[in-house]
Image: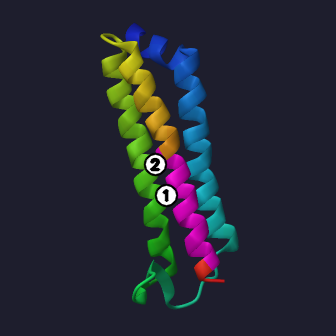
């Protein structure tokens, strides 16, 4: 790793945003693995106008935290490149990552609630 990338990950604001984002993504996976029932068909999408409109296998619910984790990693990589030029934009990416992780945990908890 280059020294600039090491400095990026040692930065206090970077750690304060990336660590909670990763913990929230792992919490979403934990909700699915430990609480979600493993029936044949689970509700994957619910619409207030039409009700249940997408059913699927239980492991397809894992795509939500996986997408969140990929976006957290992508934001960390982009933030490390941007951090050298403008730290404020890199910090905004980090806070956006935390907000994204909250959206992932809300979506996962709603799916767990629908399938119980």
Q: Which mark is residue 65?
A: 1
Q: Position of residue 8 (x, y in %)?
A: 46, 16
Q: Residue at 36% of width from left, 22% of height from top? A: 89
Q: Residue at 59% of width from left, 34% of height from top? A: 19
> Residue placed farthest to the right in the image?
34
* Badge 2 element: helix
Q: Is residue 89 left or right of residue 21?
A: left
Q: Residue at 65% of width from left, 64% of height from top? A: 31
Q: Position of residue 58 (x, y in %)?
A: 51, 79
Q: Residue at 44% of width from left, 51% of height from top? A: 68
Instruction: Find residue 113 and report its image quarter.
Output: bottom right
Q: Which residues are magenta?
A: 100-113
Which quadrant holds the N terminus? top left
Whether 84 is among the magenta residues is no
Q: Does 15 appear above or below 65? A: above
Which quadrant holds the C terminus? bottom right
Q: Does 63 appear above or below 26? A: below
Q: Is residue 2 left or right of residue 113?
A: left
Whether 111 is among the magenta residues is yes
Q: Does 106 appear above or below 99? A: below
Q: Position of residue 2 (x, y in %)?
A: 37, 12
Q: Position of residue 28 (x, y in %)?
A: 59, 58
* Badge 1 element: helix
State yes or no: discs 2 and 1 in contact (Cβ < 8 Å).
yes
Could you say which is closer to the camera, residue 2 or residue 10?
Answer: 10
Magenta stretch: dominant secondary structure: helix
Q: For mark 1, does the 10 Å Cα neighbourhood hold few (<14), some (14 to 19), or many (20 or more) residues?
A: many
Q: Which residue is mark 2?
A: 69
> Residue placed farthest to the front in the image?
49
């Amino acid at each position: 790793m280059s020294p600039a990338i090491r400095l990026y990950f040692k930065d206090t604001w970077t750690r304060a945003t990336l660590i909670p984002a990763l913990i929230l993504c792992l919490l979403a996976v934990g909700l699915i693995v430990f609480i979600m029932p493993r029936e044949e068909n689970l509700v994957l999408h619910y619409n207030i106008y039409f009700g249940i409109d997408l059913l699927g296998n239980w492991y397809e619910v894992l795509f939500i935290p996986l997408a969140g984790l990929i976006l957290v990693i992508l934001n960390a990589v982009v933030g490390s490149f941007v951090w050298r030029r403008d730290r404020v934009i890199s910090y905004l990416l980090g806070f956006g990552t935390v907000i994204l992780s909250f959206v992932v945990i809300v979506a996962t908890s709603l799916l767990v609630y629908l399938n119980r």
